[in-house]
Amino acid sequence: MSPADHRPIGVFDSGVGGLTVLRALMARLPGERTVYLGDTARLPYGTKSADVVTRYSVRSAELLLKQDIKLLVVACNTASAVALPALTQRLSIPVLGVIEPGARAAVARTRNGRVGVIGTQGTVRSGAYQRALEAARPGVTVLARACPLFVPLAEEGWTSGDVPKLAAKRYLAELSSAGVDTLVLGCTHYPLLRGVIAEAVGPDVALVDSAEATAEVVASLLAGRGELGQSADPEHRYFLTDLPEQFIDVAARFLGQRMQSVEQVDIS
Amino acid sequence: MSPADHRPIGVFDSGVGGLTVLRALMARLPGERTVYLGDTARLPYGTKSADVVTRYSVRSAELLLKQDIKLLVVACNTASAVALPALTQRLSIPVLGVIEPGARAAVARTRNGRVGVIGTQGTVRSGAYQRALEAARPGVTVLARACPLFVPLAEEGWTSGDVPKLAAKRYLAELSSAGVDTLVLGCTHYPLLRGVIAEAVGPDVALVDSAEATAEVVASLLAGRGELGQSADPEHRYFLTDLPEQFIDVAARFLGQRMQSVEQVDIS
């Protein structure tokens, strides 16, 4: 067994969504230290140009590098879609997005080759999941649907009950009847709505959580490099570029626990 | 009768929401030319600092002034809350926000002195309506509630049916049982959901649409200054700082008609 690598894993997103990715990482790799950066002062990234998102992503990465991270997870679909090449080129550590792991997990799961993808309008319109799925398995049929209400439902904490149930049914009816057997949760907010999404598509459709798929890839990659951490009680640090009121409460729902030691930073 | 003033009315917002204010203006003052500016490249304003919103508002006003406008309507609750003093100081034409007209209309309507206000989290948290209502009638009781799902519901076009009905019921139950007799639609998106909001609070609660209230104040003000327009087929121009896909379709729902002659401009 190789000696433990105590450097933290770095994770960044424009806001709270990436906390579901962090949560999956903490569950899959309980011995790892982590450092999270939420660029809350400049959210949302989804409406910004690729150049701007890349510039912000590079700044976020630079802050995390100062924390001596061993691997960077881009826990934001928009940044994963546009900024990975620039980040990979600049950083000497491994850089992972959430899109490719989700796409690979989906093609591994599908039996009939019909995969559904749900995400924000920005993610669906970018075609990033569609391209990643086609790259992972040429010829796969991809049906994508934007579900704009899911983000505010998750942030409100309306994750069960009539409103999210009916919204999920309405958004997913078409994908269900089109016969997809696998559905990618292509937005970091959607794991909070997993229950109502599963109910809407029924038990014959496998749900692929990009957050869990990404955590799995991180685990393999660190194991392969001999860089796994083995802390008994690892530290988790949180940096935010702005600290809006109520953020801590909303964040707790995404993370599944309260954030310890939140620090506000200026990276503009 | 004074001679007609053919200069247009200028209206700006960060996105589509202000189009409900423009629509109310066009209905109330059908002889007026208008120029609309949507700062779509930099939306949302609600999460930005007061300084930044003021700077963007001044830029927007400068662009509209080049169109020789006779009056400026700030059709954005966030900008109305923070940028009016700076705009009034800089401009020699009248400048109106949407908050004060809505607050004045509400205190004119209430009989029991209990007024509800619904808006975005940013607007409710700013306390701008609460202050304006208290200024318009000292001692009024104000109950405010943020309804974050209403904006995406309006933008999705989900304005009738189960999902918006149940969401409205859930958001408004507390205000209803607290005995408000007047409810201010304190977000420019909410007029699209007027039907389900009215159903949720019942016939004994009067709804005050800030857009209509603002159009009424504009009409009085122009009449008082002898500056009413009397065009038979007035021109309506639209400037946007970015033109996202689907924007034109979403805008049509807010405006009640297709926008003619959309021009993209850079005011950064």
Image (tube, coloured by chain):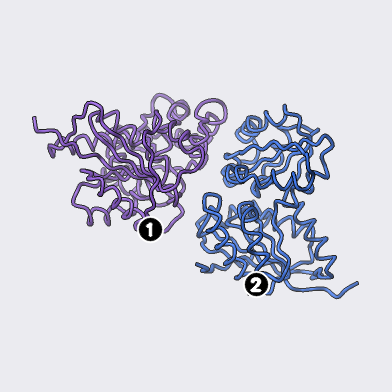
Chain colours: A blue, B purple
**Residue at the spot 33% in from the left edge and 55% down from the top edge:** B59
In the rendered image, residue A168, in percent from the top left (x then y), is placed at: 65, 34
Give the SS element for disc 1: helix
In the rendered image, residue B220, in percent from the top left (x then y), is placed at: 19, 35
**Residue at the spot 83% in from the left edge and 42% down from the top edge:** A109
Chain identifier of the residue bearing label 1 in the image: B
**Left or right: A16 as drawn, with respect to B234:** right
- Asked whether A190 or A107 is in front, the reply is A107
In the rendered image, residue B222, in percent from the top left (x then y), is placed at: 18, 37
Task: Give the vertical position of A81 relative to B154 (above or below).
Answer: below
**Left or right: A257 as drawn, with respect to B202:** right
- Asked whether B265 or A204 is in front, the reply is B265
The amino acid on which the numbered mark 1 sits, given as a three-letter code, is: Ala
**Left or right: B223 as drawn, with respect to B198:** left
Count the marks: 2
Task: Give the vertical position of A195 relative to B127 (above or below).
Answer: above
Q: Which residue is mark 1?
A: B50
Query: Same subunit under labels 2 and 1?
Result: no
Give the SS element for disc 2: helix
* Residue, far right: A1
Query: Can you see residue B117?
Result: no
In the rendered image, residue B163, in percent from the top left (x then y), is placed at: 57, 30
Image quadrant holding the C terminus of chain B, namely bottom left
Query: Can you see residue B231?
Result: yes
Chain identifier of the residue bearing label 2 in the image: A
Task: Give the vertical position of A160 relative to B28 (above or below).
Answer: below
The amino acid on which the numbered mark 2 sits, given as a three-letter code, is: Leu
- Asked whether B109 or A83 is in front, the reply is A83
Q: Which residue is mark 2?
A: A65
